[in-house]
Image (spheres, rainbow, N blue to C red):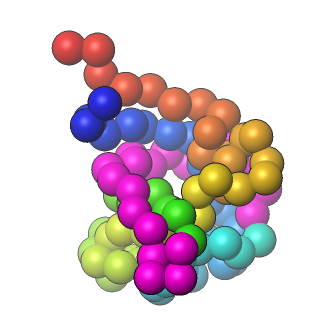
Amino acid sequence: SQQPVSVGIEGTGAAFRHYSGGIFDGECGTDLHHAVTIVGYGVSKEGTKYWVVKNSWGQTWGEDGYMRIKRDVDAPQGMCGLAMLAFYPLA
């Protein structure tokens, strides 16, 4: 708990690649072609739960290099497959 989690994610779709802000809930699959780090979570004013994700594509992508991606979706694999392959430090 209270540590970053590295996850695989489907990051090849246009909606993901061109994300510029807001809580992402766009079209994406579950073919894990990319890795990101979950660094936090939150809830919007409207009640939408999201993960805070750090990407490696630089500060010009997303929200200064970060993405808010919808969590607690109906799919067990998570949004864009991010619940399928996760790694976290043990020490």
Looking at the image, the residue that sits furthest to the top is 91
| Residue 17 percent coordinates (x, y) | 58, 73
In the rendered image, the quadrant that contains the C terminus is: top left
Examine the image and state in which quarter residue 52 appears: bottom left
Determine whether 40 is above or below 24 in the image. above
Relative depth, front residue between 11 and 1: 1
Q: Residue at x 59, y 64 (%)?
A: 70
| Residue 51 percent coordinates (x, y) | 46, 57
Examine the image and state in which quarter residue 69 appears: bottom right
How many labels were placed on the picture? 0
Q: Residue at x 79, y 48 (%)?
A: 75
Indicate yes or no whether the magenta region holds residue 31.
yes
| Residue 68 percent coordinates (x, y) | 46, 69
Q: Is residue 89 left or right of residue 42?
A: left
| Residue 86 percent coordinates (x, y) | 52, 31
- Residue 8 visible? The answer is yes
Determine whether 43 is above or below 84 in the image. below
Relative depth, front residue between 63 and 50: 50
- Residue 10 visible? The answer is no
Q: Is residue 83 left or right of residue 91?
A: right
Q: Residue at x 26, y 36 (%)?
A: 3
The region drawn magenta spans 28-47
Looking at the image, the residue that sits furthest to the left is 91
Q: Residue at x 36, y 68 (%)?
A: 66
In the rendered image, the quadrant that contains the N terminus is: top left
Determine whether 86 is above or below 61 in the image. above
Examine the image and state in which quarter residue 83 appears: top right
